[in-house]
Amino acid sequence: MSFSNDNEDEKGLRIANLHVEYAAGHAPLRDFHLHVPEHSLYTIVGPSGCGKSTLLRAIAGLLSSYGGQIRFGGESLRGSGALIGFVPQNYGLLPWKTVRSNIETALKIGRPGRALQKQHEEQATHWLTAMGIADLADRYPLSLSGGQQQRVAIARAFALQPTILLLDEPFSALDALTRENVQAVFLENWRNHPTTTLFVTHDVEEAVLLGERIVVMPSKQGESADILDNPVFALDAAGKRDSDDFYRQVRRMRKVIQEKW
Ligand SMILES: Nc1ncnc2c1ncn2[C@@H]1O[C@H](COP(=O)(O)OP(=O)(O)OP(=O)(O)O)[C@@H](O)[C@H]1O
Ligand SMILES: [Mg+2]
């Protein structure tokens, strides 16, 4: 590998030899490696229980211990000061705060002193509107449906404009039409702010629609993930879903998954 490649590699998120053991002998991730170049959007698919959420939690700094390295821009992610936006599988909302306050609190903590309260309010309003839930701003999370809570969590992560965005099945609770709308908003936002992003999904079509490349996790611990190029990513949004390229790639993905899992 040339030096210039090494420098390019340094810029991204690099996970090396990641080892997570929850209990003696139970390690969903063993010797796991992944490199996500800066400003790229990778989708991740994998069988239930293979360690996708564990991987995102490790990157988000939510695991008390793990082995291996998680680096960003050539230094330890924790020490790099990179702001991480995380949409966890269970939404991770604060039940005692209103929808609006969930977003504004995240902005206050994540971006202290960087903006006035008024700007936080504007950001919250903008993203709640983009997610189609502006009318829920004063409600509490537990009074919302799963899909509504999920959209609050997405609005919160987008409002933060993080350096690294981690999404764990973020659209899984949405009906088909809302999901298509939110996917479009997500892609447009990503193109405007190409945040280094890892997006976990169980939906092969979603992985193909959204991923610049697609990470296929192994079903067995210790095996390596496959990383597939995705030509669909470069297509124009209009007609992408109905294109031959899209169907071809979905078929190819299904084949890889059948062979790998
Ligand atoms: N806090 C925990 N304590 C013990 N075991 C855990 C814990 N969290 C996850 N596990 C186990 O680790 C393995 C990986 O879990 P993880 O949640 O990362 O899977 P996943 O790939 O996200 O699955 P899914 O697609 O169902 O969300 C599973 O066997 C799970 O039971
Ligand atoms: Mg999971």
Image: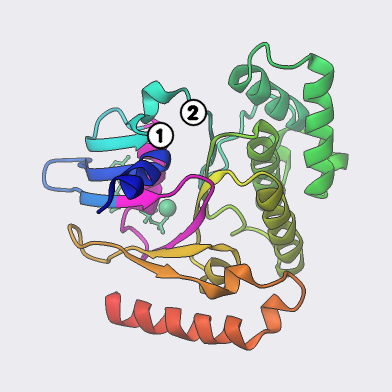
Residue 8's disc number: none
Determine the residue located farthest toward the left in the rendered image: 25
Q: Which element is circle 1 on?
A: loop
Q: Which element is circle 2 on?
A: loop
Q: In which quarter of the image is residue 136?
A: top right
State whether residue 230 is above or below residue 5.
Answer: below
* CB within 8 Å, label 2 to label 1: yes
In magenta segment, residue 111: no
Instruction: Specify the amino acid type for callout 2.
Output: Ala
| Residue 16 point in image, percent of width and height | 25, 44
x 24%, y 61%: residue: 224
| Residue 3 point in image, percent of width and height | 29, 45
Is 86 displayed left or right of 25 in the figure?
A: right
Q: Nearer the viewer, residue 203 or 95?
A: 203
> Disc 1 designates what residue?
73
x 72%, y 24%: residue: 104
Q: What stretch is highlighted in magenta?
A: 34-62
Instruction: Specify the amino acid type for callout 1.
Output: Gly
Beta carbon of the mark 2 residue lies under 8 A of ligand 1? no
Q: Which of 261 and 192 is in front in this view?
A: 192
